[in-house]
Image: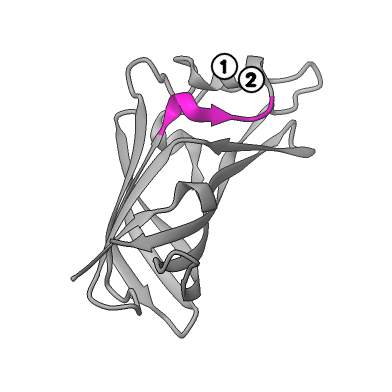
Amino acid sequence: MKNWTIDSMHSEVQFKVKHLMISTVTGQFNEFNAEVKSNDETFDEADVKFSAKIDSLSTGSTDRDGHLKSEDFFDAANFPELKFESTSFKKLDDEKYQLLGNLTIKDQTKEVKLNADFGGTMVDFYNNEKAGFEISGSINRKDFGLTWNGVTEAGGVVVSDEVKLFMNIQLQKQ
């Protein structure tokens, strides 16, 4: 069994949400952790555990960040982390994987399906074995109790239900 941890200095965890249905706001989590257990360097059927600190959320706007951390959205005071635990990590071809697992936000856990593109493995300058993945997918925020929304005077929706997820992950073998 091979154990891997996330190299947070060379990784990023982002989300994108439509605002007013005409533009996209990008946010990221700056504090996160992941552990991966694999049988070999192919990562086929690896076990993945991931968490992110809600208070580390950043969208580039202090006011918006505060609103997202409030009870209207993530409720960071009562639910300080979001968590993901894989149920399946299947290799589809040399570069493509399908990652299934349970995502918990607030007190809601739902199964999500993510796409993972494997960038390969490499040994760095310090003789550490690294592996890279680009992971993407989308969720419906309302499935996780993130239901706040507003309507403009013209009847437009302020925040879309769909949240797109983008993660560039570099792992380091332990």
- What amino acid type is highlighted by mark number 1? His
Q: Residue at x 32, y 55 (%)?
A: 101
- What amino acid type is highlighted by mark number 2? Arg
Q: Nearer the viewer, residue 155 or 168?
A: 168
Q: Is residue 45 left or right of residue 158?
A: left
Vertical placement of residue 49 versus 57, above or below: below
- CA gap between label 1 and label 2 equals 5 Å
Q: Quadrant of residue 58?
A: top right
Vertical placement of residue 117 versus 102, above or below: below
Residue 129 seen in render: yes
Residue most extreme to the left: 1
Q: Are marks 1 and 2 in contact (CB under 8 Å)?
A: yes
In the rendered image, residue 62, in percent from the top left (x then y), is placed at 64, 17
The region drawn magenta spans 53-60
SS under mark 1: helix
Quarter that holds the N terminus: bottom left
Q: Which residue is mark 1?
A: 67
Q: Nearer the viewer, residue 159 or 24?
A: 24
Q: Nearer the viewer, residue 173 or 108?
A: 173
Query: Magenta segment: does it hold 117?
Result: no
Q: Nearer the viewer, residue 163 or 65?
A: 65
The disc placed on residue 52 is none
Q: Which residue is mark 2?
A: 64
Q: Residue at x 48, y 76 (%)?
A: 120
Residue 104 seen in render: no
